[in-house]
Amino acid sequence: GAVVSQHPSWVICKSGTSVKIECRSLDFQATTMFWYRQFPKQSLMLMATSNEGSKATYEQGVEKDKFLINHASLTLSTLTVTSAHPEDSSFYICSAPPLERGGDTQYFGPGTRLTVL
Amino acid sequence: GQQVMQIPQYQHVQEGEDFTTYCNSSTTLSNIQWYKQRPGGHPVFLIQLVKSGEVKKQKRLTFQFGEAKKNSSLHITATQTTDVGTYFCAGPGGKLIFGQGTELSVKP
């Protein structure tokens, strides 16, 4: 149980285009999902908290107009990287704590590797 | 803001040797979690520690939470090549703040 999927698993796009990444909880519901970014050989940096039915909350330094987050349902959150540039190339990972289990344990998606040319 | 520091950044061991990574928080933590990330993979939850002074074991892995709930450690006894990866501590709660991670490599 507690499986989180991400789509796509990798994407290559041209500079200036937008890329949408989906994060789905497959066998549980989550009112909150988290989006992280990880550069090579670095730790995970929290970008934003996705809240079902309300606006996402962004960490300091993360541009909300560039990284659009939509939590459409209790099982789906999307991250759209708008007008992507090469410096946005990174590993994007989502996570979710199962609503029905309580506690703080989070389950991570497999990640999406974005390369912007 | 809250910071979670982790050392060492890298650790290279011979198979069979022990390994320890340490995590320190600038503030008291309600709980701390440990994750393992294999090369090219995503973080996988290992364990959560909640109580002051708590010690938990998972086979060859021993996790400790300090008395002051500001530090934690992960110790692996007799490392195997399957232990290769980066170990992260993170805390607390939903909005996880990750340590820098310790990358473990094991030479057969």
Image: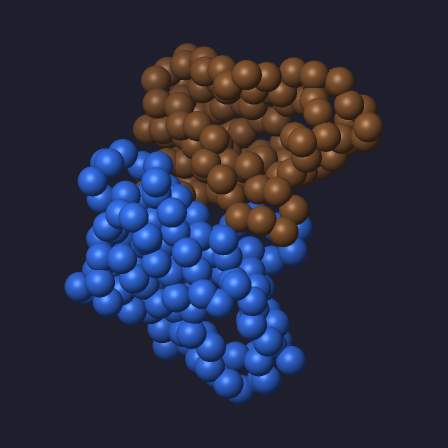
Query: What residue appears at the point 29 percent right and 69 percent down from the top-left corner?
Result: A70
Which chain is in blue here?
Answer: A
Which chain is in brown here?
Answer: B
**Residue A103 sits above or below residue A86 on the image:** above
Identify the coloring: by chain
In the rendered structure, the answer to whether residue A63 lies left or right of residue B63 reads left
In the rendered structure, the answer to whether residue B1 lies left or right of residue B75 reads left
Query: Which quarter of the image is occupied by the C terminus of chain B?
Result: top right
**Residue A61 sits above or below residue A85 on the image:** above
Q: Is residue A90 visible?
A: yes
Q: State the count of labels.
A: 0
In the rendered structure, the answer to whether residue B69 lies left or right of residue B78 reads left
Q: Quadrant of residue B67?
A: top left
Where is residue B15? Give x, y as percent. 77, 23
Query: What residue appears at the point 65 percent right and 38 percent down from the top-left corner?
Result: B85
Q: For the view shown, which residue lies furthest in the left direction? A: A53
Q: In which quarter of the image is residue B76?
A: top right
Question: Along the line of sight, which residue is nearer the eye, B86 or B92?
Answer: B86
Query: What residue appears at the point 43 percent right and 69 percent down from the top-left corner?
Result: A21
Q: Can residue A36 be seen in this view?
A: no
Query: Which quarter of the image is occupied by the N terminus of chain B?
Result: top left
Where is residue A51? Give x, y as percent. 24, 59
Where is residue B93? Give x, y as percent. 33, 38
Where is residue A4? Give x, y as percent. 39, 51
